[in-house]
C-alpha cells in the first residue's frame, strides 16, 4: 500500500503515480502502518454504513437518552421529599416515559420491530418494510417529549414541595382587601 504525499489517497504497491492527482509515489508503507490504516478505513466504512441505517442512533439521541435517565433519577430522589400521598403516580408516569424514551434513544430497532408486529395485522409483507420519514421524525419527537415530560415532573414536584413549605396564614378564613 502506498499513500500519495499530495492528496493522501491510498494506492496499490505497483503504482508509481497517484491515480487521483498524478503526484509521484514513494515507497510502500510498512506492514504495521498498513495494518493500522486498514483498521482506520474499516472503522470509517462501518461508521458510514451505520449512518445510512434509517434507525441510526446519533450522539444527540444518546445524549437525550442519558438526559431521560438522569431526570428519572431526579424524580426518584424528589419522591422521597414529597409529602403528597399521590407521589407514586408521578413515579409511575416517569417510569413509563423513561422506558419509552430510553428504548427509542438507545435501541430504536426494538421499537421498529414492535411497529412491524403491529403492522403485520393489517399489511402483508412487513418483513421487508423500512421506516418512513414520518416514523423517523416521530421517533425523534418521542425521545424529546419523554425528556420534557420527565423534566416537567421534576418542576411539578419541586413546585409542590415549595408550596407545601410555604407558611400558612394565622387566620385562614380572613380575606385581606387592599
Image (cartoon, rainbow, N blue to C red):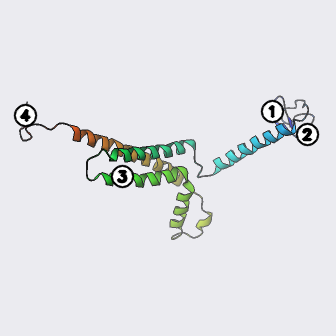
Task: Name above or below for residue 120 compared with residue 39.
Answer: below
> Which residue is depicted at the point 31% across and 41% down?
158
Give the crowd class for mark 1: few <14, some 14-19, many >=20 residues within 10 Å: few
Q: Residue furthest front?
A: 80
Give the crowd class for mark 4: few <14, some 14-19, many >=20 residues within 10 Å: few
Whether the residues at callouts 1 and 2 have beta carbons within 8 Å, the answer is no
- Residue located beneath label 1 in the image: 8
Task: Name above or below for residue 133 compared with residue 26.
Answer: below
Q: Secondary structure at mark 3?
A: helix
> Which residue is depicted at the point 7% across and 34% down?
176
Question: Residue 91: which disc?
Answer: 3
Between label 1 and label 3, give the one nearer the viewer.
Answer: 3
In the image, is 39 to the left or to the right of 18?
Answer: left
Q: Earlier in the sequence, mark 2 or mark 3?
A: 2
Between label 4 and label 1, give the one nearer the viewer.
Answer: 4
Q: Earlier in the sequence, mark 1 or mark 3?
A: 1
Q: Earlier in the sequence, mark 4 or mark 1?
A: 1
- Residue located beneath label 2 in the image: 13
Question: Residue 176: which disc?
Answer: 4
Whether the residues at callouts 1 and 3 have beta carbons within 8 Å, the answer is no
Q: Secondary structure at mark 1?
A: loop
Foreground pick, 177 / 165: 165
Whether the residues at callouts 2 and 4 have beta carbons within 8 Å, the answer is no
Q: Secondary structure at mark 2?
A: loop
Residue 148 appearing in the image: no
Cα gap from disc 1 to disc 2, whole angstroms = 14 Å
Between label 4 and label 3, give the one nearer the viewer.
Answer: 3
Q: Earlier in the sequence, mark 1 or mark 2?
A: 1
Residue 102 appearing in the image: yes
Q: Earlier in the sequence, mark 2 or mark 4?
A: 2
Q: Quadrant of residue 18?
A: top right
Amino acid at each position: 500500500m502506498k499513500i500519495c504525499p499530495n492528496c493522501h489517497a491510498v494506492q496499490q504497491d505497483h503504482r508509481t503515480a497517484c491515480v487521483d492527482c498524478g503526484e509521484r509515489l514513494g515507497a510502500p508503507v510498512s506492514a504495521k502502518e498498513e495494518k493500522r490504516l486498514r483498521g482506520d478505513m474499516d472503522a470509517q466504512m462501518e461508521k458510514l454504513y451505520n449512518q445510512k441505517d434509517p434507525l441510526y442512533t446519533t450522539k444527540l439521541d444518546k445524549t437525550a437518552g442519558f438526559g431521560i435517565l438522569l431526570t428519572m433519577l431526579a424524580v426518584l430522589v424528589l419522591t422521597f421529599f414529597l409529602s403528597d400521598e399521590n407521589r407514586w403516580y408521578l413515579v409511575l408516569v416517569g417510569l413509563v416515559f423513561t422506558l419509552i424514551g430510553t428504548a427509542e434513544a438507545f435501541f430504536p430497532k426494538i421499537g421498529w420491530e414492535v411497529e412491524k408486529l403491529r403492522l403485520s395485522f393489517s399489511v402483508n409483507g412487513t418483513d421487508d418494510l423500512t421506516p418512513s420519514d414520518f416514523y423517523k421524525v416521530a421517533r425523534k419527537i418521542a425521545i424529546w417529549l419523554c425528556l420534557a415530560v420527565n423534566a416537567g415532573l421534576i418542576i411539578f414536584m419541586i413546585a409542590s414541595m415549595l408550596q407545601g413549605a410555604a407558611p400558612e396564614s394565622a387566620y385562614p378564613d380572613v380575606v385581606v382587601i387592599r
